[in-house]
Image (cartoon, rainbow, N blue to C red):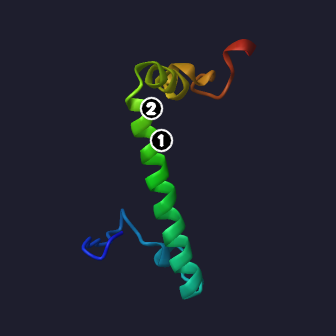
Amino acid sequence: MSGEEKHTNTAADPDLAALYPDLAPQRLQEAEENLEAYIEHALVMYERIRQDPDAYRQFRALTGRASSGYDDIGRTHLNH
């Protein structure tokens, strides 16, 4: 996050220090930077997919509930 951005933590939005209280400060900073880079990369990939109608249809097919291949109790459609 840039220095201009202000982030407040809530119970629904804990920071990494709350999740990993025993993490050394240097490791905590590294984890936060890695998480931010991962999120930014995921957003770039999603935006690229959204800009390509064929890729977006494929993305939706792969991530949609109907394409999971499992029913509500974990059985595949092949072993019913």
Quarter of the image for residue 70 reads top right
Asked if the residues shown at circle 2 and circle 1 are in contact, with their CB atoms under 8 angstroms apart, the answer is: yes
Mark linked to residue 60: none
Residue 8 visible: yes
Q: Could you say where residue 2 lies in the image, as x and y percent from the top left?
A: 32, 71
Q: Could you say where residue 79 lies in the image, as x and y percent from the top left?
A: 75, 15
Q: What residue does disc 2 label?
A: 49
Give the spatial CA distance, label 2 vs label 1.
Answer: 6 Å
Q: How crowded is mark 2: few (under 14 residues within 10 Å), some or many (20 or more)?
A: some
Residue 80 visible: no
Depicted 47 relative to depicted 25: above or below: above
Depicted 15 relative to depicted 50: above or below: below
Check the image and name the residue furthest to the right: 79
Q: Could you say where residue 5 lies in the image, as x and y percent from the top left?
A: 26, 70
Could you tell me the amino acid type at mark 1? Met
Q: Residue at x 55, y 72 (%)?
A: 31
Could you tell me the amino acid type at mark 2? Ile
Quarter of the image for residue 12 reads bottom left
Q: Could you say where residue 50 lies in the image, as x and y percent from the top left?
A: 39, 31
- Number of marks drawn: 2
Mark linked to residue 45: 1
